[in-house]
Amino acid sequence: MKRFLVPTFLVLALAATPAAARVDRLEPPQQITVVGPGGSTPRLEDVREAVITAGIPRGWHLVEDQPGRAVLRNVIRGKHTVVVAVVYDQSSFRIEYVSSENLNYREKRGKAYIHPKYFQWTNNLAQDIRLAVASP
């Protein structure tokens, strides 16, 4: 019996490990500096337009638009939903987590955790915004 239980326990323990490891700590958002074409200072309207349109090819859509703050939503493969707020001014922006579905978001001891794909998707969005602001 013992001979059967030990290997079974090891298989179950190893099978559960990837599921448990599929979350990373959600750190406070970083401020990302933007530069206009040729290193110029962009207009606030140019930053706003970049925030709203840069992520469209990757599925990001505007949900709410306020001065200096745009809420964007992305539904990935019809399974995962991410909602972020992009807070911006003339020289920088930051992407703040708002909500998600099916991304294992949880809070534990005052710290937030989420699926690692969240970081890939929001990093891509940040890069797209920076490139859009810098484009003539």
Image: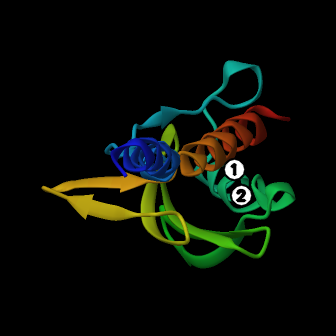
- 60 with respect to 25 (left or right): right
Q: CA distance from mark 2 to mark 1?
A: 5 Å
Which of the image's four quarters has the C terminus? top right
Query: Residue most toward the left?
Result: 109
Residue at 73 percent of width and 42 percent of height: 128
In the figure, 12 relative to 6: above or below? Answer: below
What label does residue 98 carry, if any? Answer: none
Camera-side residue of 64 and 79: 79
Where residue 72 appears, as percent x and y from the top left, is 61, 68
Residue 46 numbered tag: 1
The picture places residue 66, in percent across and down from the top left corner, at 50, 74
Instruction: Say few, some or many: other residues with alpha carbon within 10 Å of mark 1 (under 14 / 14 to 19 / 20 or more).
Output: some
The answer to whether one can see residue 130 in this image is yes
**Does the image show residue 88?**
no
Residue 83 position in % (x across, y down): 54, 69
Q: State yes or no: discs 2 and 1 in contact (Cβ < 8 Å).
A: yes
Residue carrying label 2 = 49
Classify mark 1: helix, strand or loop.
Answer: helix
In terms of image quadrants, where is residue 17?
top left
Q: Residue at x 69, y 31 (%)?
A: 36
Which of 129/114 is in front? 114
133 vs 81: above or below: above
Among all residues in the image, which is located at the extreme front?
A: 1
Indicate how the structure is coloured in the image: rainbow
Is 83 situated left or right of 120 in this image? left
Decide if residue 53 is on the left or right side of residue 68: right
Residue found farthest to the bottom? 63
Amino acid at pointer 2: Glu
Give how far across and how far down residue 32 sits, in percent.
49, 34
* Mark 2 nearby-residue class (10 Å; few <14, some 14–19, many ≥20): some
